[in-house]
Amino acid sequence: MMTTERIDTEPVAARSPVQRIIGHLVLGLLSLFCVFPIYWLYATSLRAPGDVHQLSVLPWPLSTGNYADALGKIDLAGMLLNTGIVAVLSAFGQLLVALLAAYAFAAWTFPLQRVLYLMFVGTWLVPFQATMLPNYVLLARLGLLETLAGVIIPTLCSALGVLLLREHLKSFPKDLLDAAKMDGRSSWSTLWTVVVPTLRPVLAALGILLAITAWNEYFWPAMVLQRSNAVVQLGLRSFLGTEGNEWGPLMATAGLTCLPVFVLYLVLQRHIVNAFVRSGLK
């Protein structure tokens, strides 16, 4: 018995230096594999206009001609502003709807709760192509075609957001909700003063996911804004034509379009890490 106890309490042996080196090499190679397309995007954008099709890894001589051509051909600042408005409002609307719905499904008990939840989440499985035409016809009748509101409104409900937030709210201590109710707080006050402060990392991570999805969306804005290049996703097609593609300005515009997303991630990366840590410890 004593021998068994000694064996059970022995610490697990650490990995050998060779295993650690191999692990770091594998991670490094995978990182290079993921980062290289982004590097090639900026490397191509910094080549001289006549050297865009060269395959050298290092662009030389460096040139900003592609950026000048891109800024001279399209209103990139206006497109970035419109795209930012669409991404922020779409993400904020989805977060708000998902938070309210998830709080209702997790904190309250009402008839047919599970059935309604499954029906709500089941909309996530409905392909976009099935709802595309009804949404388009409704927007046409409301006079919202060729407007940013027409791009934003049909995206304000996210079944994925409800699913993720409900799973986090299910682990929220019920005693805190009961204590808030005994203190005389309303459900609305409890949500914003007790529940939301603990969900900041999760909301930040989900908000970034929703914002990036809205930022990168092309097909739906292309349907609603058929005669307008109001957002950068549609502005990129200005460099594609039947007579040839302008790859240099295209890469320059795409590179500038990626910068706001990088900045958003850098600002909120701490909240994203906290969200994954909490999910792993839940």
Image: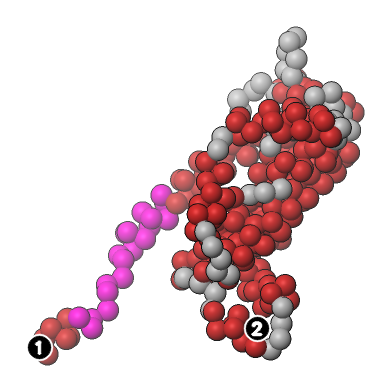
Q: Residue at x 45, y 51 (%)?
A: 27
- Asked if 237 appears above or below 202 in the picture, the reply is above
Q: Residue 68 got which mark?
A: none
Image colouring: secondary structure
Which is nearer the eye, 212 or 34?
212
Which range of residues does the magenta coloring cover?
A: 8-26
Main secondary structure along the magenta-highlighted residues: helix
Q: Residue at x 56, y 66 (%)?
A: 110
Occupied quadrant, residue 183: bottom right
Mark 1, secondary structure of its residue: loop
Report the amino acid beneath label 2: Lys
| Residue that protrudes farthest toward the front in the picture | 111
Tally of numbered discs: 2
Q: Residue at x 86, y 32 (%)?
A: 143
Q: What x and y, as percent, mark residue 73?
A: 87, 26
Residue that label 1 marks: 1
Q: What x and y, as percent, mark residue 197?
A: 67, 74
Which corner quadrant holds the N terminus?
bottom left
**Residue 59 visible:** no
Residue that label 2 marks: 181
**Label 2: few (<14), some (14–19) or many (≥20) C-alpha neighbours in 10 Å:** some
Q: What x and y, as percent, mark residue 172?
A: 54, 74
Mark 2, secondary structure of its residue: helix
Residue 22 within the magenta-colored segment of the rendering: yes
Report the amino acid beneath label 1: Met
Residue 25 within the magenta-colored segment of the rendering: yes
